[in-house]
């Protein structure tokens, strides 16, 4: 039997090859045989074209035809797809890795391995000119590509299209990112900036759509929506469009394997002004997202400068200078200080020299002028004590409790102190010692530590001008109270699942454990429904609280919905105990004001755990785990701790009879 007949017989014996391929390959084989008879193998193979995703791919070692199989340099094909190629000279073994697929094959060995499973090759790999030559169809299809022979063009066409599987939007500090996930990768992309409306168009070559929907409505101040569609089907090109509220510079990049295309863009500065927050006058810079800032002060004339990094001035900010009626500031000015890198500069023209610091939040940056703590004093009162701070201007402050020994710690950020004297030792049976320190933060913070016999509650009052803050200290109302803390779900019940796979049961437990620590530090006794990932029945949870005669019951949860931009805090109660509504109001108010989350209200629903508990009971839904931004916050231990602290403060407010 002739070599050509043997080739044709081998093809016919393969059940998965179509008649069309038989005919095409026969033509190719005839051409190959004709060429081989006249000019030899190397010259014949030189005519074989290698076309990948519509583009002719050059190769320093020409493809060849061996026993009816097109043989190509391994590295040419695999690296075009973004695969990682390795070679062990001792064992003469080549390896290829791409998106979870691992291939290995030896020179001269018909056995190859795909993810450690053996495969028999019709033609073994060879070495030519320092290159590993492999059967094209094997390596192409192993990497998820389709391989076709074009007898007219005497070419092999390889097509490997990636699938767009996800679009996510993340608002990080300093910049936002839209990530386009592409299983299998893209062969390249191009971008176009368009106006009316303002949008960024990204064409992803060699991709098809595999998304649950075509449009992702974010309705965010920095990004309106993302739209997807088919731009071309031959070749396959998917189009992704980012609709911006206004023209927004953006940078588009792909990862090493082209499986994720990221669009990164900065935020806008939308407004500037002076406001009174509490007792403090501050500079408020409106932004479309959480920004990074740097501050400095200048002289001759005196100025305070806030540089907003990675930002651009919004078209809506039409007044670049604002005159201010304030004892410290005469005027605020704003402008684009630098385009590359992007920096927006806000300048406060000062009436007197002062330092400045910045606090960045989700949609604003707050400039705080540095205060001076001038005096610290303490006086005894019936069943209480009064601590008074005299400051140069209105200030904001926070308080936290620590145990062993019992301490109430007051932190006054954006402040300093020169000499407040030695520690105060009241000796009144309530407060043991009051000490102070200036922490070398940037800017500095004044910290007061009040060590006490028992845990303390406090109420604060301010003088009309904000320059005097008085804290009335009393024994903690939580001392001895039994609080049952119920982390939602657990065991086989995961609760909600975030876009990146975060399980609600894990987040609920982390927050609940922080809450336990805060309550214990405040003098309460705490009974945890679970401290690990175990299953506890719905009716078993309130039964535990009732059997132990709980004073309070707090169930910690996080929410979810099909709409992935839903966000906010909800607090639930039932009328089983008449005090549950007051507890829910106190806890909800504390969470909203402490964390700045969206207020979705205090609600009543007959959830088993709070309906069946006899003590005042609430169920707190912190944030929406289904929202990618909320999920990121909930995974952050610092946010978990802040949420737990806010719930604890709400409990303390409930017992203290506050709103």
Image (tube, helix red, strand yellow):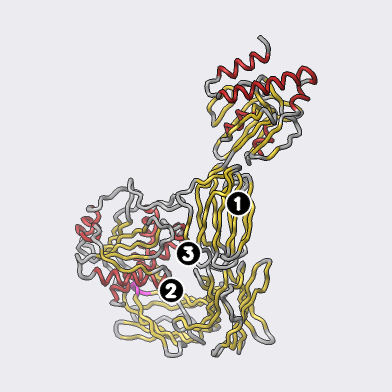
Specify the quadrant that holds the N terminus: top right
The mark found on residue 219 in the picture is 3
Q: Is residue 331 above or below residue 48?
A: below
Residue 212, image x and y in percent?
Answer: 45, 49
> For the residue labelled by badge 1, is the local secondary structure a helix, a strand or a loop?
strand
- Relative side of 494 to 334, left or right: left
Disc 2 crowd rating (10 Å Cα; few below 14, some 14-19, many 20+) is some
Residue 13, image x and y in percent?
Answer: 56, 17
Q: Are marks 3 and 2 in contact (CB under 8 Å)?
A: no
Q: Quadrant of residue 99?
A: top right
| Span colored in magenta | 452-456
Residue 346 appears in the figure: yes
Q: Earlier in the sequence, mark 1 or mark 2?
A: 1
Q: Are marks 1 and 2 in contact (CB under 8 Å)?
A: no
Residue found at the very far top of the displayed protein: 1
Residue named by callout 1: 203
Q: Earlier in the sequence, mark 3 or mark 1?
A: 1
Name the residue rendered at 62%, 27% in the picture.
105
Give the label, 3 or 1, closer to the camera. 1
Residue 295, image x and y in percent?
Answer: 61, 75
Give the label, 3 or 2, closer to the camera. 3
Q: Indicate whether residue 490 is drawn in magenta.
A: no
Residue named by callout 2: 409
Q: Indicate whether residue 455 is drawn in magenta.
A: yes
- Whole-number angstrom distance, CA of label 1 to CA of label 2: 55 Å
- Relative side of 12 to 54, left or right: left
> For the residue labelled by badge 2, is the local secondary structure a helix, a strand or a loop?
strand
Name the residue rendered at 55%, 77% in the picture.
271
């Amino acid at each position: 039997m002739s070599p050509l007949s043997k080739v044709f017989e081998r093809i016919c014996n393969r059940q998965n090859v179509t008649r069309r391929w038989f005919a095409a390959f026969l033509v190719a084989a005839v051409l190959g045989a004709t060429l081989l008879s006249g000019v030899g193998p190397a010259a014949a193979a030189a005519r074989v074209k290698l076309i990948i995703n519509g583009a002719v791919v050059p190769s320093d070692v020409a493809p060849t035809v061996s026993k009816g199989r097109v043989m190509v340099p391994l590295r040419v094909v695999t690296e075009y797809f973004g695969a990682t190629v390795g070679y062990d000279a001792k064992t003469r073994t080549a390896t290829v890795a791409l998106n979870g697929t691992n291939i290995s094959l030896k020179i001269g060995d018909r056995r190859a391995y795909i993810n450690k499973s053996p495969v028999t090759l019709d033609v073994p790999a060879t070495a030519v000119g320092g290159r590993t030559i492999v059967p094209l169809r094997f390596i192409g299809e192993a990497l998820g590509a389709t391989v076709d022979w074009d007898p007219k063009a005497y070419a092999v066409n390889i097509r490997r299209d990636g699938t767009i599987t996800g679009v996510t939007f993340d608002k990080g500090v300093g910049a936002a990112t839209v990530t386009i996930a592409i299983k299998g990768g893209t062969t390249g992309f191009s971008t176009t900036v368009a106006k009316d409306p303002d949008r960024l168009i990204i064409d992803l070559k060699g991709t098809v759509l595999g998304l649950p929907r075509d449009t992702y409505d974010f309705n965010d101040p920095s990004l309106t929506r993302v739209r997807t569609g088919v731009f071309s089907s031959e070749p396959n090109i998917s189009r992704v469009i980012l609709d911006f509220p206004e023209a927004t510079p953006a940078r588009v990049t792909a990862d090493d394997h082209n499986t994720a295309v990221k669009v990164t863009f900065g935020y806008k500065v939308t407004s500037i002004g002076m406001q009174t927050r509490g007792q403090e006058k501050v500079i408020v810079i409106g932004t479309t997202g959480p920004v990074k800032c740097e501050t400095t002060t200048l002289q001759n004339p005196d100025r305070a400068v806030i540089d907003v990094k990675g930002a651009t001035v919004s078209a809506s900010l039409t007044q670049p200078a604002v005159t201010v009626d304030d004892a410290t500031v005469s005027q605020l000015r704003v402008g684009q200080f630098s385009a590359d890198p992007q920096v927006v500069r806000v300048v406060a023209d000062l009436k007197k020299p002062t330092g400045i610091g910045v606090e960045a939040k989700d949609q604003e940056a707050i400039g705080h002028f540095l205060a001076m703590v001038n005096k610290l004093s303490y006086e005894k009162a019936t069943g209480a004590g009064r601590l008074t701070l005299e400051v140069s201007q209105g200030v904001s402050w926070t308080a936290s409790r620590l145990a062993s020994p019992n301490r109430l710690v007051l932190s006054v950020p954006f402040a300093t102190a020169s000499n407040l004297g030695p520690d105060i030792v009241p000796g009144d049976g309530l407060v043991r010692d009051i000490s102070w320190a200036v922490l070398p933060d940037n800017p500095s913070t004044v910290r007061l530590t009040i060590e006490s016999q028992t845990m303390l509650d406090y109420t604060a009052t301010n003088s009309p001008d904000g320059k005097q803050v008085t804290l009335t200290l009393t024994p903690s109302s939580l001392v001895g109270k039994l609080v049952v803390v119920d982390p939602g779900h657990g065991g086989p019940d995961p609760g909600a699942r975030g876009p990146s796979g975060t399980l609600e049961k894990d987040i609920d437990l982390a927050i609940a454990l922080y809450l336990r620590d805060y309550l214990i530090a405040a003098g309460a006794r705490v009974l945890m429904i679970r401290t690990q990932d175990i299953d506890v029945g719905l009716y078993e949870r309130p039964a535990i609280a009732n059997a132990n005669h709980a004073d309070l019951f707090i169930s910690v949860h996080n929410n979810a919905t099909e709409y992935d931009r839903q966000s906010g805090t909800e607090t639930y109660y039932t009328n089983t105990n008449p005090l549950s509504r007051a507890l829910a109001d106190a806890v909800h108010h504390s969470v909203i004001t402490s964390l700045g989350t969206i207020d979705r209200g205090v609600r009543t629903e007959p959830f088993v755990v709070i309906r069946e508990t006899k003590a005042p009971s609430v169920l707190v839904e912190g944030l929406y785990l289904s929202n990618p931004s909320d999920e990121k916050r909930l995974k952050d231990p610092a946010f978990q701790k802040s949420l737990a602290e806010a719930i604890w403060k709400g409990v303390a407010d409930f017992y203290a009879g506050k709103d």
